[in-house]
Amino acid sequence: MGKKSQDVVSGYLQQQMLIAMPAMADPNFSRSVTLLCQHNEEGAIGITINRQSGVTLGELLFQLNIPCESEKIASMIVLEGGPVSPDHGFVLHTPVEGFDSSIEINDDIMVTTSRDVLSAIAAGKGPQQFLVALGYAGWGDGQLESEMRQNAWLSVAADKGILFDSALQNRWEKAVGKLGININDLHGVGGHA
């Protein structure tokens, strides 16, 4: 395996959603679903997709001096994407090219961090489907892999339907359901072979 740590397999969690196990004690992640945006030898970055912040999109746009005439857009909730850098915004959206800073998660989902996507959304010219989040979840080199071995997380393929079409309060159950298991059958601790 060369000099690379055997604990890190670059990118094996790309295009995945992390599902917090029921016994997750960290209040930042209890019953959370986190879309991984990056996973490599330096660590992982994800956006939690089922935590409501206390901010509406209209309030955020106002703070950024971006005019918004649409009450529907202004009243949308902003998600709490994670405990790291809660002043940084992320827009998860269906694919649209042309924004200054976007990364493709999979064929159905992109993440954009540049202000131009918010301007387009406010003008009613943004992506067809989108979520806005403040902050992100981050793991250092090998940290997420260690948490996976400790049975803190399950993973499932990133799913556009869960992200954009499921009610916020149902996303954890929907993600668990993709695994084909009953939530009541999940236990806080697991065995190791």
Image (cartoon, rainbow, N blue to C red):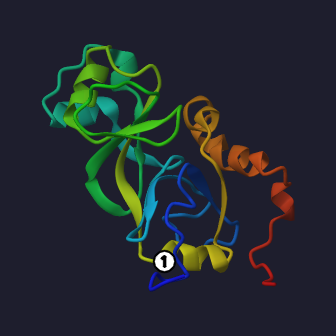
Q: How many marks?
A: 1
Compared to residue 40, the image places residue 66 above or below, namely: above
Residue at the far front in the pictured view: 2
Left or right of residue 18, residue 60 in this image: left
Residue drawn at 26 percent across, 39 percent down:
101
Q: Which residue lies under the disc numbered 1?
A: 143
Q: Nearer the viewer, residue 125 or 122?
A: 125
Q: Quadrant of residue 117?
A: top left
Q: In the drawing, does residue 140 fall left or right of residue 184?
A: left
Q: Could you say which quadrant of the image residue 63 lies in?
A: top left
Residue 25 in sight:
no
In-image side of 146 versus 66 (left or right): right
- Residue at left offset 38%, top offset 71%: 42
Asked whether residue 13 is in view, the answer is yes
Q: Residue 155, percent across and down?
A: 65, 58
Mark 1, secondary structure of its residue:
helix
Q: Amino acid at mark 1?
A: Gln
The image shows residue 152, relative to residue 63, as above or below, that is: below
> x, y percentage for residue 188?
74, 75
Q: Quarter holding the C terminus?
A: bottom right
Measuring from the top left, give residue 97's x and y in whole percent: 34, 25
> Where residue 70 sits in the image (x, y, percent)?
32, 14
Look at 63% across and 32% down and name the residue there. 161
Quadrant placement of the N terminus: bottom right
Examine the rendered structure and indicate whether residue 27 appears above or below residue 15.
below
Name the residue nearer the viewer: 145 or 78.
145
Residue at the image position 25 percent from the left and 13 percent from the top:
69
Is the residue 158 above or below the residue 40 in the image?
A: above
Q: Residues within 10 Å of mark 1 (few under 14, many from 20)?
A: some
Q: Is residue 67 left or right of residue 155?
A: left
